[in-house]
C-alpha cells in the first residue's frame, strides 16, 4: 500500500473526520467569541478531543506531498498548543510536528506568547527522535554567503536549490509562504558572491517599488558592500557601484531600455501571474524579452498558481527550467459566512464556511439600513477594539464612508498616539485640512488606496502593521502587490477593477493575507451576505482555488481573426479595449520580427491556418512603418497608424516645426503649449481620438500636468481644482475634489501624458532629421520621469533617488539653491539642511532627518 493510500485510509475514517471537524469548530468558535462583543453570542462547548490520536495521525500527515494533508497537520499542531492545558504533556508533540513542517516561526511565536517555555525541551524524547529533529533543523538551514544562515521552510529550500541549478525558475506558493523573504536572501547571497552584479527586480506597481526598496535597503545595509539600489530609469542616477539592484515596474524598465541596455545577471519577476493582466501583461513580457540575454537567470514568483510550468513557453525550449510549486500554508485560516437572520435587521448568524457547520448568533447595536452600514457594522462587531482589521472596499469613496461608520459604531475616542497625530498633520497639509482622512485618523482608523501620496500611504501601512491603526479600509491596491498582512479581513461582494466581481483566485490571494506568519497563529476572513448570489456570483468562498497563469499575449492570439481584421483595416483608431491591447501586442511583435523570432514565438501559442496570414500581415505592417518602426517598438501601446498620422501632421508643418516643440514646463507659455499638444495627440496618436476630452477638459488637465511637472505640492493642485469647480458653479465635496485630483494625477500625469509625450517627441525629432531641420528638445529629455515623479529639476530627482518621497523632496529642495545636483551634491546639501527652523510637517522632517543621518553614516 502506498503512502497516499495509507493517508487516505486514515483521514477518511469516521472517527478522524469527527475529531478533526471538532478541532475546526472549536477554532472557529474561539475566534468568534474572541472577536465579537455581542451579548447574544452563544457560548460554544465542545466535547473532549482525542488529542493523542490526532497528533499521531498528524505526524504521519507531515510526510504527505498533498498540501491539504499538511494543512491538517498544521491545524492540529497549532490548535493543540492553543486549546489544551500546558500540563497535558502533549505540547512537545506539537513542537515536533511544527519542526517537521519547517514552521519554526510558529514555535518562536508560541514562546513569545508564553505558551511554550523559552528554553523548553522534550525530556521524554528518545535519542532517535532528538536526532531526527536535529536533522530537520540542519537540512532546513540555508547559508547566505559564508557565515550567515537562516532556517527556511520547504518551499524556500526548494526555490533556493532551483535558483542555483537552473536558468529560468517559476515558483508558486500561497501569500504567506515567504516568497519575498527568500528572494531577498537570494539577492544578498548573489551580491556577496559576485564582485560585479546587475540585478533587476520587476514589480507590478509603484507602491511595491517603495516597499521592495525599503526592504532591500535594510538587507543591504547589514553588508560591508558598496551596492547601488536604483529606482529611477535615468542614466545619470545609476550610481557608480559595481553591484546594482534595479527595482522597476515594466513601464520604468521600458524607459531605461530606450536609452541604455544594461546586462542583467538575474531578473526577478514578482507577482508573475500578472503577465495575464491586459495590456500591462503584454508590456511585462515585452520588457522581460528586451532585458534578458541568453545568460540571464530569470526567477518568476506567483501566488498559489496551478500551472507555474506555463512560464516555460515564454523562453526557449532547450533552456534549463524548473517549476517550484507548493500549496502549503504557514498559518491556518478560518473563513466565516455572515448572514442576516430572517425578518430581523440586527440579528445575524456567523458560521465557518461549509454546508454543515454550526451557526452562532450575534446582535448588532444599530440597524444596518444601507449596504455600506452592513459592511461597516459587522466589521466593527467582529473586529472590536483590537488591531489588525482590514476592510476590503470596492471604491475609495466607500473607504471614506466605512471608516466613519466603524468609528461611530464603536464610539471611539480620539487617539493619543503621537505618530498618528503627526500623520493627521501631514494629511491636512499635504492634501486638505477638510479631507476625511485626517478625521478618521483621529479615531485610530485609516483608509488606503493607490492614488494617495507615497509618504502618507507608507506611513499608514507602517502604523497599521504596528497596531497603532486598528482598522484599515482598503481597495484592490492590496491585491495589486502591497505586501501587507492582517489578523482579520472583512468583505462584502468584493470587486476588482471597474465593477468586475472578484474572481475566486483573486479572493484567495487576498484572503492569504489574513494571519501574519510569526505574529498570529490563525487568520480570519469574514464574508458578509454570502447567501446573496448577486454579491457572490461564484458562490460563497469555501475552498482555496489556484490561479491559472495565462499570458495576455496568448489571450490576444486566441482572437487571431479579430487581430488580423484590425491590421487589415489599417489599425483604425477606435475606442475598443481589444484594439487598445492589440497595439501593445503589435509593438512587441514588431520587436520580435526585427530579431527574426516572431514566427517561432507565435507558433508556441497558436495552432491554426491563420498563423501564416498573421505573420505576413505583421511583416507588411513592419515594412510600412519603415524607419518609424523603432518608434513603435520603444513606445508600446501607441497605435502604429497614429504614429504615421502624426508624422504626416508634422511633415505638413515642417516650415514652422519649432512651434510644435512643447514648452519647458517652467516657461510662462507652458499651459497654452500643452493644451495644443493634447489637441494634436487627440487628432493623431490617441486610440480613442478623444483621450484628453474637449477643450475645457484639455485645459484642466494641462493645468494639472504643468503644475505637477513644476513640482507643485498636491495641496496646491487640490486648491486649484477646488477654485476651478467653484468658478464653474459645481458644488463638489472636498472628498470628491481630492479623489478626482489624485485620480487625474495617476491616470494622466503619470501614465497617459508620458506615454504619448515620449512618442510625440520621438516622431517630431525624426521628422526634423528627415528634413534636415534643427529643433531643441533638450529641456524635455527627462520628461517621462518628470511626469511620473511630478518634479522639474535634477535636484528633485537626486533627492528621490536617495530615498525621499516626492512630498519631502519638493519641501527640502525649497531650501536648496542649486537645482542641478546629482547624488553627491544632494548628499552634501542634506547634511547642511537646518530642519529645526523650518516650518515643515513633522513626518516630512523625520523622513528628511532619517535620510540625512544615513547620508552622514554613509559618508
Image: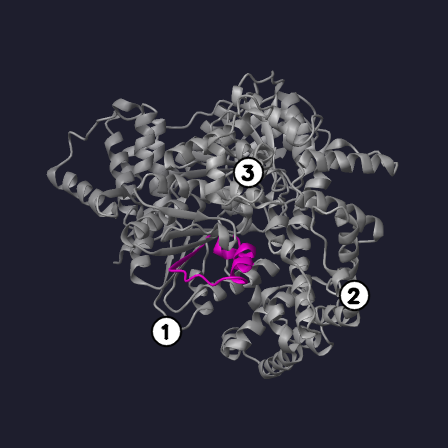
SS category of the residue bearing label 2 = helix
Across and down, in percent, residue 447 comes to: 61, 33
Q: Nearer the viewer, residue 176 or 356?
A: 176
Residue 419 visible in image:
yes
The quadrant of the image that shows the C terminus is top left
Across and down, in percent, residue 202 comes to: 48, 54
Residue 353's place in the image compared with 625, above or below, is: above
Disc 3 marks which residue? 805
- Name the image quarter holding residue 120: top left
The span from disc 2 to disc 3 (Cα, nearest Å) is: 40 Å
- Disc 3 + disc 1, Cβ < 8 Å: no
The magenta region covers 249-276
Disc 2 marks which residue? 656
Local crowd size for mark 3, using a 10 Å CA cut-off: few (<14), some (14–19), many (≥20): many
Residue 744's place in the image compared with 690, above or below, is: above
Q: Nearer the viewer, residue 370 or 32?
A: 370
SS category of the residue bearing label 3 = loop
Q: Nearer the viewer, residue 292 or 18?
A: 292
**Colouring method of the image:** one colour
Q: Is residue 317 magenta?
A: no
Disc 1 marks which residue? 318
Q: Earlier in the sequence, mark 2 or mark 1?
A: 1
- Name the image quarter holding residue 267: bottom left
Does residue 519 appear to the left or right of 713 in the view shown? left
Residue shown at 39% from the left, 37% from the top: 517
Residue 388 visible in image:
no
Q: Earlier in the sequence, mark 3 or mark 1?
A: 1
Q: Earlier in the sequence, mark 2 or mark 3?
A: 2
Amino acid at each position: 500500500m502506498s503512502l497516499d493510500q495509507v493517508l487516505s485510509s486514515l483521514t477518511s475514517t469516521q472517527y478522524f473526520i469527527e475529531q478533526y471537524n471538532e478541532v475546526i469548530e472549536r477554532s472557529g468558535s474561539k475566534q468568534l467569541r474572541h472577536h465579537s462583543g455581542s451579548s447574544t453570542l452563544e457560548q460554544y462547548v465542545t466535547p473532549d478531543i482525542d488529542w493523542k490520536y490526532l497528533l499521531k495521525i498528524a505526524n504521519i500527515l507531515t510526510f504527505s506531498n498533498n498540501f491539504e494533508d499538511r494543512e491538517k497537520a498544521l491545524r492540529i499542531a497549532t490548535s493543540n498548543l492553543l486549546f489544551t492545558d500546558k500540563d497535558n504533556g502533549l505540547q512537545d508533540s506539537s513542537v515536533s510536528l511544527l519542526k517537521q513542517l519547517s514552521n519554526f516561526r510558529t514555535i518562536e511565536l508560541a514562546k513569545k506568547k508564553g505558551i511554550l517555555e523559552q528554553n523548553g525541551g522534550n525530556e521524554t524524547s528518545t535519542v532517535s527522535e532528538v536526532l531526527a529533529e536535529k536533522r530537520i533543523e540542519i537540512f532546513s538551514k540555508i547559508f547566505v554567503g559564508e557565515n550567515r544562515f537562516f532556517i527556511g521552510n520547504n518551499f524556500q529550500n526548494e526555490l533556493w536549490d532551483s535558483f542555483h541549478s537552473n536558468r529560468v525558475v517559476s515558483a508558486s506558493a500561497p501569500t504567506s509562504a515567504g516568497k519575498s523573504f527568500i528572494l531577498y536572501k537570494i539577492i544578498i547571497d548573489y551580491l556577496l558572491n559576485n564582485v560585479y552584479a546587475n540585478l533587476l527586480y520587476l514589480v507590478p506597481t509603484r507602491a511595491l517599488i517603495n516597499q521592495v526598496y525599503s526592504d532591500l535597503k535594510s538587507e543591504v545595509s547589514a553588508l560591508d558592500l558598496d551596492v547601488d539600489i536604483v529606482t529611477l530609469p535615468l542614466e545619470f542616477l545609476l550610481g557608480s557601484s559595481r553591484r546594482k539592484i534595479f527595482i522597476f515596474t515594466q513601464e520604468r524598465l521600458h524607459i531605461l531600455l530606450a536609452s541604455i541596455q544594461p546586462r542583467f545577471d538575474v531578473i526577478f519577476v514578482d507577482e508573475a501571474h500578472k503577465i495575464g493582466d491586459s495590456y500591462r501583461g503584454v508590456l511585462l513580457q515585452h520588457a522581460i524579452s528586451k532585458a534578458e540575454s541568453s545568460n540571464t537567470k530569470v526567477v518568476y514568483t506567483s501566488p498559489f498558481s496551478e500551472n507555474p510550468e506555463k512560464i516555460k513557453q515564454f523562453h526557449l525550449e532547450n533552456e534549463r527550467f524548473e517549476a517550484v510549486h507548493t500549496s502549503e500554508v504557514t498559518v491556518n485560516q478560518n473563513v466565516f459566512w455572515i448572514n442576516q437572520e430572517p425578518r430581523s435587521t440586527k440579528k445575524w448568524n456567523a458560521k465557518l464556511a461549509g454546508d454543515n457547520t454550526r451557526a452562532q448568533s450575534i446582535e448588532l447595536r444599530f440597524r444596518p439600513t444601507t449596504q455600506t452600514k452592513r459592511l461597516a457594522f459587522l466589521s466593527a462587531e467582529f473586529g472590536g477594539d483590537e488591531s489588525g482589521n482590514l476592510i476590503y472596499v470596492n471604491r475609495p469613496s466607500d473607504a471614506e464612508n466605512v471608516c466613519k461608520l466603524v468609528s461611530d459604531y464603536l464610539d471611539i475616542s480620539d487617539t493619543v498616539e503621537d505618530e498618528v497625530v503627526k500623520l493627521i498633520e501631514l494629511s491636512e497639509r499635504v492634501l486638505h485640512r477638510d479631507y476625511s482622512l485626517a478625521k478618521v485618523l483621529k479615531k485610530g482608523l485609516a483608509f488606503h488606496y493607490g492614488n494617495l501620496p507615497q509618504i502618507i500611504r507608507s506611513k499608514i501601512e507602517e502604523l497599521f502593521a504596528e497596531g497603532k491603526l486598528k482598522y484599515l479600509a482598503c481597495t484592490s491596491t492590496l491585491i495589486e502587490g502591497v505586501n501587507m498582512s492582517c489578523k482579520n479581513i472583512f468583505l462584502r461582494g468584493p470587486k476588482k477593477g471597474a465593477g468586475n466581481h472578484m474572481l475566486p483566485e483573486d479572493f484567495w490571494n487576498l484572503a492569504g493575507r489574513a494571519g501574519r506568519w510569526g505574529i498570529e497563529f490563525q487568520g480570519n476572513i469574514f464574508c458578509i451576505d454570502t447567501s446573496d448570489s448577486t454579491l457572490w456570483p461564484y458562490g460563497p468562498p469555501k475552498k482555496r482555488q489556484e490561479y491559472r497563469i495565462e499570458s495576455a499575449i496568448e489571450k490576444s492570439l486566441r482572437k487571431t481573426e479579430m487581430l488580423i481584421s484590425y491590421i487589415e483595416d489599417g489599425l483604425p483608431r477606435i475606442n475598443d479595449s481589444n484594439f487598445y491591447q492589440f497595439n501593445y501586442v503589435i509593438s512587441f511583435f514588431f520587436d520580435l520580427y526585427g530579431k527574426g523570432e516572431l514566427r517561432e514565438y507565435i507558433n508556441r501559442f497558436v495552432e491554426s491556418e491563420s498563423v501564416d496570414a498573421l505573420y505576413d500581415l505583421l511583416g507588411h505592417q513592419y515594412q510600412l512603418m519603415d524607419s518609424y518602426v523603432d518608434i513603435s517598438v520603444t513606445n508600446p501601446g501607441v497605435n502604429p497608424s497614429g504614429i504615421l498620422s502624426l508624422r504626416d501632421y508634422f511633415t505638413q508643418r515642417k516650415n514652422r516645426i519649432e512651434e510644435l516643440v512643447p514648452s519647458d514646463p517652467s516657461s510662462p507659455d507652458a499651459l497654452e503649449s500643452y493644451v495644443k499638444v493634447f489637441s494634436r495627440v487627440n487628432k493623431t496618436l490617441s486610440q480613442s481620438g478623444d483621450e484628453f476630452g474637449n477643450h475645457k477638459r484639455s485645459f484642466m488637465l494641462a493645468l494639472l500636468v504643468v503644475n505637477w511637472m513644476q513640482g507643485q505640492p498636491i495641496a496646491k493642485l487640490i486648491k486649484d481644482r477646488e477654485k476651478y469647480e467653484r468658478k464653474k458653479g459645481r458644488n463638489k465635496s472636498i472628498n470628491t475634489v481630492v479623489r478626482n485630483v489624485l485620480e487625474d494625477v495617476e491616470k494622466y500625469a503619470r501614465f497617459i501624458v508620458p506615454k504619448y509625450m515620449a512618442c510625440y517627441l520621438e516622431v517630431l525629432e525624426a521628422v526634423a532629421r528627415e528634413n534636415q531641420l534643427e529643433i531643441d528638445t533638450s529641456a524635455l529629455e527627462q520628461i517621462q520621469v518628470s511626469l511620473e515623479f511630478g518634479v522639474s529639476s535634477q535636484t528633485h530627482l537626486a533627492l528621490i533617488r536617495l530615498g525621499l518621497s516626492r512630498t519631502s523632496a519638493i519641501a527640502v529642495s525649497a531650501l536648496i539653491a542649486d537645482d542641478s545636483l546629482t547624488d553627491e551634491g544632494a548628499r552634501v546639501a542634506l547634511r547642511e539642511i537646518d530642519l529645526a527652523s523650518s516650518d515643515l510637517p513633522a513626518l516630512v522632517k523625520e523622513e528628511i532627518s532619517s535620510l540625512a543621518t544615513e547620508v552622514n553614516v554613509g559618508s
